[in-house]
Image: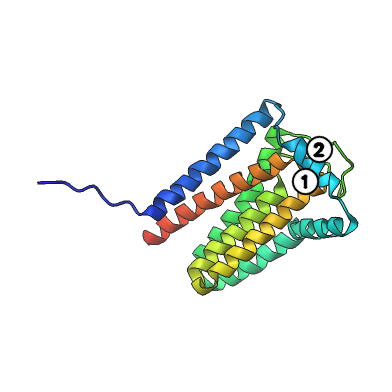
Amino acid sequence: MTRHLPRIHPGLLLYWGALLAMLYAFAELAGDVYERERIGFDVPILNWFHAITTPPLTALALTLSFIGSVYILAPAMLIVVLWLWRVSKRSALFFVLGFGGAVMLNFAAKAFFARLRPDLFAQLSPENSFSFPSGHSMGGAAFFLSLYFVVRHHAPKWQWLAAVLGLLLTLGISLSRPYLQVHYPSDILAGWALSTLWVLGVNLWYARARRGR
């Protein structure tokens, strides 16, 4: 009697592939930063951002950077959590773990790697904390990815809008940081990788817990 292997859903393979890809990307970047090795694309990209600097672009970058700051994302998180608490306490917990956990992870990573900020050009928005990985990139990616999963579950007809707006805002917030000369591009990539890895992991736990109710 032939024994058939269980069919694996392609979406699950893609999900695990994304997890492993994010883990690999962060590990590669983190290894170079830990060993204090120069990452080849950092300086050329910072030079390019410096070359295109204009007052209107600087004003836009400062606005996007402010949107990705704690002054905006923290109140936004509170609003989302208060709404979710009335709809689903489990989803509210997921959002707190997804976004809040990524923020705490960023603090820990910054303290561990202790990478100094870029000093090629004058900072357009002075920062004196450590650089790796980017807190704005991690916070923005975690907030909008967590929000996407929540919207997908509770209001699926809006999921594509949440995905597109979240992606655009995450990109805008993140790219504003090397433009302002306060982060290396590798800080941004590492922030995206670690934040995505964290939120995907939390979502995997959340999905399994929901099925086990």
Q: Residue drawn 71% across and 48% down?
A: 135
Q: Earlier in the sequence, mark 1 or mark 2?
A: 2
Relative to 169, does residue 182 appear above or below in the rendering? above
Q: Position of residue 199 (x, y in %)?
A: 55, 52
Total labels drawn: 2
Q: Nearer the viewer, residue 45 or 6?
A: 45
Q: Residue drawn 56% across and 63% down?
A: 148
Quarter of the image for residue 65 reads bottom right
In the rendered image, the residue lying farthest to the left is 1
Q: Position of residue 105 (x, y in %)?
A: 63, 44
Q: Amino acid at mark 1?
A: Pro
Q: Is residue 159 left or right of residue 127?
A: left
Tell me if mark 1 has few (under 14), some (14-19) or many (20+) residues whose alpha carbon lies within 10 angstroms of its own.
many
Q: Is residue 196 left or right of residue 182?
A: left
- Disc 1/disc 2 C-alpha distance (Å): 9 Å
Pointer 2: what residue? 118
Tell me if mark 2 has few (under 14), some (14-19) or many (20+) residues whose alpha carbon lies within 10 angstroms of its own.
some
Pointer 1: what residue? 178
- Classify mark 2: helix, strand or loop: loop
